[in-house]
């Protein structure tokens, strides 16, 4: 399912919690999906019953990564993510960080890649204050969207 509003997300997560499911949350741009992304998402999903992925809108990607990004539209990125067996729900967010979304859903587990530390993970305090866990997953060596874009430019 691709959710587009905070209200949809709150209702969804509320229903999941009532059924006793453990909610895992991660976020990112996921512009050109690669093996590093899929490995990461599978590992995140294994930490709970349901994986919710916060996806930066095109507007927020441009603010964060520059005017030439994203390569793929938010709708295309959301559709590809939602098709993965490890991803249960995709939620678009327009802010530069997912803090508002994390405060809205308060996941049981908050996951980020190994390039983050506990201190740099947005929303970690919120999740831990509600008894949740914050987990970092090691990155897959040599896999990055920026690397793919740079290689494509030299071809």
Image: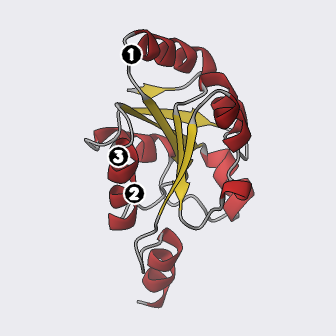
41 vs 154: above or below = above
- The extreme bottom residue here reads 154
Q: Quadrant of the C terminus?
A: bottom left
Q: Nearer the viewer, residue 71 or 50?
A: 50
Residue drawn where x is 39% and y is 42% of the image? 47
Q: CA distance from mark 1 to mark 2?
A: 24 Å
Q: Nearer the viewer, residue 154 or 111?
A: 111
Q: CA distance from mark 1 to mark 3?
A: 28 Å
Label 2: few (<14), some or many (≥20) within 10 Å?
many
Residues tagged 1 and 3 counted as in contact (Cβ below 8 A): no
Residues tagged 1 and 2 counted as in contact (Cβ below 8 A): no
Of tags 1 and 2, the one toward the viewer is 1
Label 1: few (<14), some or many (≥20) within 10 Å?
few
Sequence order check, earlier mark of 1 and 2? 1
71 vs 143: above or below = above
- The extreme front residue here reads 131
Element assignment for label 2: helix
Of tags 1 and 3, the one toward the viewer is 1
Provide the residue designation for mark 2: 40
Provide the residue designation for mark 1: 20
């Amino acid at each position: 399912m691709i959710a587009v509003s905070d209200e949809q997300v709150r209702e969804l997560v509320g229903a999941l919690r009532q059924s006793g499911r453990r909610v895992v949350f991660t976020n990112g741009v996921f512009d050109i999906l690669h093996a590093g992304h899929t490995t990461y998402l599978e590992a995140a999903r294994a930490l709970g019953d349901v994986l919710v992925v916060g996806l930066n809108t095109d507007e927020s990607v441009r603010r964060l990564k520059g005017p030439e990004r994203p390569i793929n539209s938010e709708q295309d990125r959301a559709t590809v993510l939602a098709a993965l067996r490890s991803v249960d729900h995709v939620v678009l967010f327009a802010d530069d960080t997912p803090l508002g979304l994390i405060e809205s859903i308060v996941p049981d587990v908050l996951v980020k890649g190994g390039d983050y530390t506990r201190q740099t993970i947005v929303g970690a305090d919120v999740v831990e204050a509600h008894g949740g866990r914050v987990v970092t997953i090691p990155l897959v060596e040599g896999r990055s969207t920026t690397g793919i874009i740079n290689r494509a430019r030299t071809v």
